[in-house]
Image (cartoon, rainbow, N blue to C red):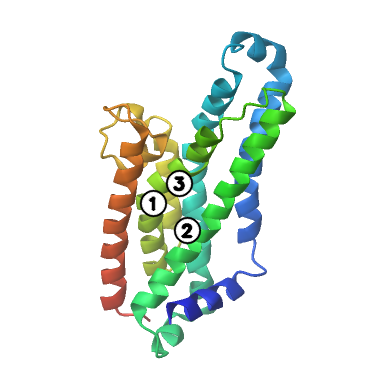
Amino acid sequence: MMFRVLAADFLKIRRKAIWFLIFLGPIGVIALQAANYGLRYDYLMEKYAANPWGAFLGNIQFLLPVTILLGVAIIASMIANIEHQMNSWKQLLALPIARTAVFSAKFILCVLMLLVSCILLGIGIVGLGLGLKLGTDVPLISVIKLSFYPFIASLPALALQLWLSVTMRNQALPLTVGILGGVVSTYASDMPDWFLWKLPLLTNHAGIPEYSVVAGLAVGIVIFTIGLLHFTRRDVN
C-alpha cells in the first residue's frame, strides 16, 4: 500500500520546482569550490601539495551542513505543502489508506530525493577534483563518506521538519526552524554532541565521524516514530 502512495507522491512532484532544488544543492557546493580554486589555485595547490585531495574534501565538508539542513527544510516543506495547497489532506486520509503509509511515504520520498543530491554531489566532487588536477588517486571511500555521512546525520532534522510541515498548514514556522537550524549549525561545533543541528558537522568529543552518523540514524528513527504516532492520531480539517 505504501508503495502506491509513494508512486502517487512522485506523480505529484513531477512538474514541481523540487527537482530543481535537488540539483541546485550539489551544483551550488561544487560551483563554490570551483570558484574558490579558480581564484586561488596556485596558492592552494602549493599550500596543500602534500595532500591536495584531503584539503579539497575538507573545504567541501565545511559547506555541507548548512546546505543540507536548509535543503532538508525546504524539501520537506514543499512536499507537505502540496497537500496543504490543494486542501487534500482530508480527502487523502478518507481513502482506505493507512495514515502510517501516508506519512511514511512522504518521509521516504524526501529521503530518496535527497539521496539523489548526495549521488550528484559525489559525482561532482570526483569530476571537479580531476578537473583541478588534484591527482588520479581519487580517495573514493572518503568521497562516499563525505557525500552521504552528513545527510544520514541530518535525518533527525528531516524527521522534525517533515513532522512540522505536515501538521502545520502555514509553512512559516517549519521553514523558520529549518533556516535557524542551518544558521546555528555553522556555530555548533562547541555544542554538546546530542545537539540535533551539530550532527551533520560529524564532529564529536570522540573524534569519530561514524558516531555522529549512528546517532543521527538512531535519533532520526525516534523523531520519525513520534511524528508518525502524532500524525495517525491528530484530527485533520
Q: Position of residue 203 (x, y in %)?
A: 35, 30
Q: CA distance from mark 1 to mark 3?
A: 7 Å
Q: Quadrant of the C terminus?
A: bottom left
First in sequence, mark 3 or 2: give its number.
2
**Identity, as a three-letter code, of the amino acid under mark 1:** Leu
Report the residue at 41% width, 43% height from top. Answer: 180
Label 1's element? helix
Count of numbered circles in the view: 3
Answer whether labels 2 and 1 touch (C-beta < 8 Å).
yes
Q: Which image quadrant is residue 161 in?
A: bottom left
Mark number, residue 155: 1
| In the image: residue 153, left or right of residue 132 | left
Q: Which residue is mark 3?
A: 151
Answer whether labels 1 and 3 touch (C-beta < 8 Å).
yes
Q: Which image quadrant is residue 194 in?
A: top left
Q: Which residue is mark 2?
A: 111
